[in-house]
Amino acid sequence: MPEFPSLGDALAWLDSHQNLERMVATVATGRTVPPDLARMRALMDVLGHPERSAPVIHVTGTNGKTSTARILTSLLMAKGLRVGTFTSPHLSAINERIAADGVPIDDASLEDLLSTLSELEPLVVAALEQADSDGARNGPVRSRPTWFELVAAAAFMYFADRPVDAVVLEVGMGGRWDATNVASASVVVVTNVGTDHLEFLGPTRAHVAAEKAGVIERSSVVVLGERSPELIPIFEAEEPSQLWLVGRDYDCTSNQLAVGGRSLDLRTPATSYEGVWLDLHGPHQGRNFAGALAAAEAFFDSPLDDKIVREAAATVSSPGRMEVVRRSPLVVLDGAKNLEGAAAAAAAVAEEFGRTRSVVLVVGMLAGAAKQPVAMLEALGVGSPAVRVRLVVACPAPSPRSVPAAEVAEAARTLGCEAVEAPDVPEALDMAFADAGDDDLVLVTGSLYVVGAARSALAVSADR
């Protein structure tokens, strides 16, 4: 089998493929071209269907997917299972996306998987071109797999080779046309429905909900964390075997601030758990834990032992999500990338960190229909007495889709907040630290790309 000389060469080959995470391809109508599952199905055919090697829990939603996937992994591992976890995006290295028992894939294994995929790619392209010429599809589409499809395929291969007992699979975007949707899930978690990626999934929340509902099969148990009455029927229309609704069938009935995390009371269809200490920050993480716990019970078709729940809650981590990385000044990293995520970050800061602290925001964000700078900064608490933001350090996110730092800074000034501009994330951190006192809070947010760059600049361990 041909092999790449190094992982760098393998990643360069991968980067030669279209990456929908970093670019927006528009059509004449102004809507973006959705992914086509034909490419991913052809990949699975050529690879011998590794996506069928273990039962799957599929996690979709607008916010909280990665944290929920990590919590689920901790719960399943505490139960004694070997678990494969696929998440996106990564913060520092692509290896983070593919993990077995919480450990990211090693460089050599990733290089080998990409080598295999590079060798087999011509077979996939030929099969798709033949289908086009035979008229088997509704018009020609790009026959070369995308960047994300190849990474998802590598994950399926890795998990099949381990092998693992269960796969926790995070949707990249939407659900119905996402590359992960070639797998059949016994349990589906929908964390919530927000307004992110409207250029792909919109224009309304109902459209977004319909795309996310596309991962549901009639054999699935659905754990639905969305409370909006007008959206619930969209998920019911997929006719899952069961639908467990937050507030009705499961819930986080008490979600209190505790030293270093949260204290939770939890209710599931089978039982309840009281005073569970969660090693994560923010009220939203309590809600994520409740959904993950319900999904684990649906997966096992039984309640979990109280000791297992407490062990998982006390050991889970979710890097880049209200992550404390320094104490003087207090530095918190949170990849809030849309209005709902920004509001959750502001609520967490107000409750856990910000009551007696001035806040310096380091902010960079990506362009998007629902992510205008003024609205994002308002959601983050700029101008709110509860958060006490006194300075915004605006910087570009390390992505071609970044909003210019000047636009973010001007938005902050529009809201009556002092703002300065930095050319990149490391310089933005230097400027924030130069201004912040020991008792202040520096919150780095607006995009996971910004948070990833900050983790690298601050030399935060990749496995924290």
Image (cartoon, grey):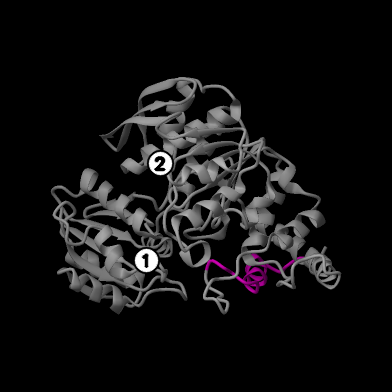
Task: Find residue 70 and report its horizontal and vertical position in percent.
Answer: 49, 42
The local secondary structure at tag 2 comes to: loop
Q: Quadrant of residue 382?
A: bottom left
- Regarding residue 14, the answer to whether it shows in the image is yes
* Residue extent of the magenta highlight: 2-21
What residue is pinned by disc 1? Answer: 371
Q: Is residue 12 in the magenta section?
A: yes
Marks 1 and 2 close (CB-CB < 8 Å): no
Q: Is residue 456 above or below residue 309?
A: below
In the displayed structure, does residue 210 sit left or right of residue 397? right
Q: Quadrant of residue 67?
A: top left
The local secondary structure at tag 1 comes to: loop
Label total for image: 2
Task: Find residue 279 and report its horizontal and vertical position in percent.
Answer: 37, 37
Amino acid type shown at disc 2? Arg
What residue is pinned by disc 2? Answer: 227
Crowd band around label 2 with a 10 angstrom C-alpha radius: few (<14), some (14–19), many (20+): some
Viewer-side residue, 394 vs 343: 343
